[in-house]
């Protein structure tokens, strides 16, 4: 039910698609994993790269085989386990929506969810991450609201309305800035006051759950930078003769 949200269904049952079909549908616009790139806080992908991808009617060489990467397979395999652990600890049901959603007002923004909790009156997102030994340096193990070793922590201070950068806000929460941006797009999609990032640290098998408040400034930046980038996507599509706005 998308009644109280900012989104509508764009494509049903994404899980039925092949990896190639899934990638091509995502060429329609910018999903949550693109938010950090739009804001310039993702060190692994450049803005020009994703603009080129979204403008292409076919899968580009750099997109091939992404689904076969060990980290991606591991994340997909462990996602149901992490969801189950969070459900047990928080005593709540987490749904796994299968559609890809499009923002009603900002049609260049899209969303796939790892998990959604709450009620039809007020949903909130639950983002799922596996933290490798190498990835631990991007997180603060002392700031989550729940840690399976030490138990419950306090709610973090709401720093969303400060004039800090996305990097600083993410550091205060204790998560990577590109995941902070991703969660803000998910929170915006559900008109939610907050979201959760549930992380399983594989080296110690520790579940750590981070609480992230709605950050309107970051959400507005995603809308603005997304719109600007999408104008470049449309220009490239027109140049290549792909006029149907990515809807194949």
Image (cartoon, grey):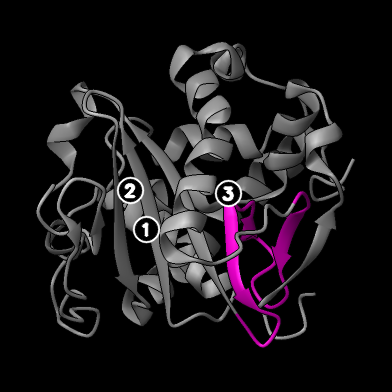
Q: Position of residue 109 (x, y in %)?
A: 61, 61
Circle 1 sits on which residue?
181
Report the residue at 80% width, 50% height from top: 245
Figure check: 198 above or below 105: above
User: Which span of residues is magenta-colored?
Assistant: 98-122
Q: Earlier in the sequence, mark 1 or mark 3?
A: 3
Mark 2 or mark 3: name the one nearer the start of the chain: 3
Which image quadrant: the N terminus?
bottom right
Between the residue at mark 2 and the residue at mark 3, the CA separation in whole angstroms equals 16 Å
Q: Which mark is residue 141?
A: none
Q: Label 3, secondary structure: give it.
A: loop
Is 50 included in the stretch rendered in magenta? no
Tag 1 and tag 2, C-beta contact below 8 Å: yes
Name the front one of labels 1 and 3: 3
In the visual, does 195 lie left or right of 137? Answer: right
Residue at disc 1, secondary structure:
helix
Residue at x-position 30% and y-position 26%: 202
Residue 95 percent location from the top left of the image: 67, 58
């Amino acid at each position: 039910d998308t009644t109280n949200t900012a989104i509508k269904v764009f494509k049903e049952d994404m899980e039925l698609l092949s990896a190639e079909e899934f990638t091509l549908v995502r060429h329609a616009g910018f999903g949550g994993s693109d938010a950090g790139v739009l804001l310039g806080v993702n060190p692994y992908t450049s803005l020009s790269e994703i603009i080129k991808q979204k403008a292409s009617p076919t899968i580009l060489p750099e997109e091939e085989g992404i689904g076969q990467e060990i980290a991606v397979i591991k994340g997909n395999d462990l996602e149901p386990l992490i969801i189950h652990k969070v459900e047990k600890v928080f005593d709540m049901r987490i749904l796994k929506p299968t559609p890809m959603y499009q923002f009603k007002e900002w049609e260049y923004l899209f969303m796939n969810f790892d998990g959604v909790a709450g009620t039809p009156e007020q949903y909130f997102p639950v983002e799922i991450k596996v933290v490798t030994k190498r990835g631990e340096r991007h997180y603060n193990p002392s700031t989550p609201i729940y840690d399976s070793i030490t138990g419950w922590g306090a709610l973090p201070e709401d720093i969303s309305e400060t004039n800090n950068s996305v990097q600083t806000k993410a550091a205060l929460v204790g998560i990577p800035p590109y995941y902070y941006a991703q969660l803000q797009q998910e929170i915006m999609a559900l008109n939610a006051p907050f979201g959760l990032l549930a992380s399983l640290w594989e080296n110690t098998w520790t579940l750590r759950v981070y609480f992230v408040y709605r950050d309107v400034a970051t959400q507005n930046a995603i809308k603005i930078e997304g719109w600007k980038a999408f104008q470049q996507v449309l220009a490239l599509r027109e140049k290549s003769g792909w006029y149907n706005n990515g809807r194949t």
